[in-house]
Image: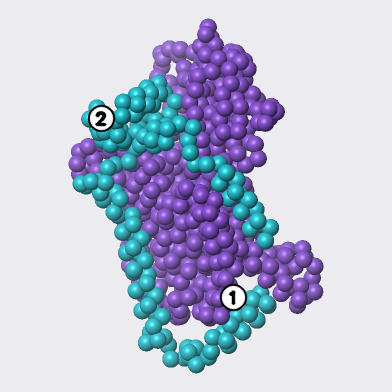
Chain colours: A cyan, B purple
Amino acid sequence: MKGFTALVTIFSLVAVLPAQEAKNPLQRELEYEIMAPCCYGSPVGDHESEAAQQVKVQIAQLLAEGKTKEEILDMYVAIYGERILARPRAQGFNLMAYIVPPLLLVVGGLFLFYYLNRVTSPAARPVSANRESYSDEFFSKIEKEMKELDI
Amino acid sequence: MITLGAYSLQLGFLFALVSLGFGGWTLARDDGRFQVAAQRALVISSGFVLLATAVLVQQLLISNLDLEYVVRYSSVETPTMYKFAGLWAGMEGSLLFWSAILAIYIVLINFLNRQRNQTLMPLVNIVLGIILLFFLLVNIFFENPFTLLPPGTILQGSGMGLNPLLQHPVMLIHPPILYLGYVGFAIPFAFAVAALIRRRLDATWIRSTRRWTLIPWLFLGVGIILGGMWAYVELGWGGYWSWDPVENASLLPWLTGTAYLHSVIIQEKKNMLRLWNVILIMITFILTIFGTYITRSGIISSVHAFAATDLGIWFFGFVVFTIVACVGLILLRWDEFASPNRLESFTSRESGFLFNNMVFLALTLAVLWGTMFPVLSEAVRGAKITVGSPYFNRITTPMGLILLALMGIGPLLAWRKTSNATIKRNFIWPGVGAVVVLVTGLAMGVSSIYVVVTLALASFVLVGIVLELARGIAARRRIAGEGMLTALLNMVDKNRSRYGGYTVHLGILIMFIGFTGKAFTVEQDMTLREGEKTQLKDYVFTLQHHYIEKRPNHIAKVIDLTVAKDEHIIATLSPEKRFYTDSDQPNTEVAIFSHGLIDLYAILGDFDQETGVAVLKIMINPLVQLIWLGGIIMVLGTIIAILPSRADRKLQEKLT
């Protein structure tokens, strides 16, 4: 139980550090949505180049002018093209980027569910595997004994 | 010496070719006369590759500026240990390094199997020979590290020096370890192909390669973590993983390799999933080559770079060749995959493993999809787009959490079928653990739902592991009357795979807790003059001094920043901005102080010598150290699983 206590302690540790930023949360969010226009290697929030610093300053100014997140992103796309966005917008062909991964998971899950259902159905089971005639209690006892013997 | 290196490389190529000739003859004619010759030729080829590598290292160490490679990736001023790192700094050297590691594996595997696996080894050597031949071919004809500078070239300076980013101690071990992982997957892959050809698809090849899979998996995992550590301490952006294509390329085979490590357990125990295991290890190997292709060909940064890079085409060709060969071989042996056993229940350990495999594969494909999507999008729409970390974090986090849940559920299920009573008995306390953390988290007002769910699942896994250990120890104490520690040690020794696996799980869950720290990162860009202070959370940062230091191959601008908490100075951070004189490149050296589980992280943008104004960024990063701690525990767990048990050692002694 010591480990569990440690986990809760860690929890308390992160919980007392409120998830609020020293800088405007929207500013920080935008800094991670816009790529550094010098190399397009990382978002401006993670980049220390002069170009990245300029963008950070511009974002602060635009926010101060009352521009919304979408307006600011639109402005950058108009100047640099879609490449400036750290992730593609979920529209048109780029919607595929967001649909395919969860689809893989769902299709994979359904397939596995179907497969397991098929192979574990009583009809698919060999006649000799007459497990149904034994009770859960019986299996539980065997499992317990096997565990005790560390098999 | 340069001539010796160049000839060694060519002789290595020649002997690999000879080995394949003999091996091919042995296979085609079913004639064993040349079997030994094939094996020896491959080992000799490996020897020449290692000699060529040693020559390149020696040339780097003496800074022979006649060699183009030395000029481009080293300099006379480069510190000696970083001259060594020049071996993997450029394309030519890193390809040779790849071949050298494969050569080491070839020599080792042939030595250790001199009396074992005699049916499979000739075929294993053919597969490894083909891989070695490919890399040597590329190395000799396209990216030769022994190319001399064109006559009459006038050098400015004494070499361009090693990229400053690579001049960090972690970079001395990160690439070799990563390569040991990448290349090592060639061994189980070669065994799988050999088992397919020889129609030996029972669990023998799996058992023969158990350690040969765990070792590259461990190296790849450690390599990835060290890469993260390097990014954290050297790149100066306060993070450890940016979903860069190069990082993704290393993660992909690790993910499928992890799925494979789980699914082989079913084949070992129940002789099932024969086809699936062959497919998984093939995918893992192909991903190691594919990773090299996508990172070395330039295809990710632009579709057009693909046509311009000869090397990309060769790697692409090799990937296609491997896929076609693997699919062909599987189809040829289709009737060999049937297993006498079958799955019996949904609620079984086997089903748990299958779901784990499915999610790992979906995660692999998702990361691959995101990595390749810019190429696809540009090909379809003609517009360049970026698929960066916000995308990957959004897509992979739910899948990672499902895996975390499965990591807790799987070990609680029994083989074949889990009775309702067992489900109740095994799940109740982990469930309580999860609910307690969930409720505590919500009550404490933790804003990120992902963080709360991660910690709740981590609690579920942890309670499960602790209970499993406690039950095992109690049983041993009751039956054998052993003390607590003896019971634990004997229990682990008796089933190293299982308890090594639990230890790895423990490491992973600690890493997951570490990942949640990102949600609580606090950062601030600022300008400070000498004597000025700023406060971030509970910490007060004061700029004490700024100065310039001239060092052997760089000039460093340094600031001393004291950190105080509750009016006590707890540390001095000295971040630097360096300018490397040999390579004409600037570089940032961050300063990190770990205060408990919280990292105080300072990055110096620059300072003005006259006005004394420093531009800097300070971050407070909680829990990052748990990621490194989890990594260490993961390594320990894998070592537990790799080392032979006492019973194995006794058996080995008797046999010898």
Circle number at residue A75: 2
Q: For the point 40% across and 68% down, which residue is it?
A: B275
Q: For the point 60% across and 42% down, which residue is it?
A: B625
Side (left or right) of A115 relative to B419 = left
- Where disc 1 sits, the SS reads helix
* Viewer-nearest residue: A90 or B50: A90
Residue A74 in the image: state x and y as whole percent: 25, 33
Q: How crowded is mark 1: few (under 14 residues within 10 Å), some or many (20 or more)?
A: few
As drawn, B333 above or below B595: below
Q: For the point 34% across and 74% down, which residue is it?
A: A114
Q: For the point 34% across and 68% down, which residue is it?
A: A110
Circle number at residue B425: 1
Q: Which chain carries label 2?
A: A
Q: How far apart are marks 1 and 2 (CA)?
A: 59 Å
Quarter placement of the C terminus of chain B: bottom right
Residue B458 in the image: state x and y as whole percent: 55, 57
Q: Mark 1 lies on which chain?
A: B
Circle number at residue A55: none
As drawn, B182 above or below B490: above
As drawn, B13 above or below B617: below
Could one spot residue B462 in this view of the protein? yes
Residue B231 in the image: state x and y as whole percent: 51, 35
Amino acid type, mark 2? Met
Do marks 1 and 2 share a chain? no
CB atoms at circles 1 and 2 under 8 Å apart? Answer: no
Amino acid type, mark 1? Arg
Say which quarter of the image contains residue B536.
top right
Side (left or right) of B646 relative to A60 = right
* Viewer-nearest residue: B347 or B597: B597
Residue extending furthest toward the top? B610
Side (left or right) of B507 relative to B648 = left
- Where disc 2 sits, the SS reads helix
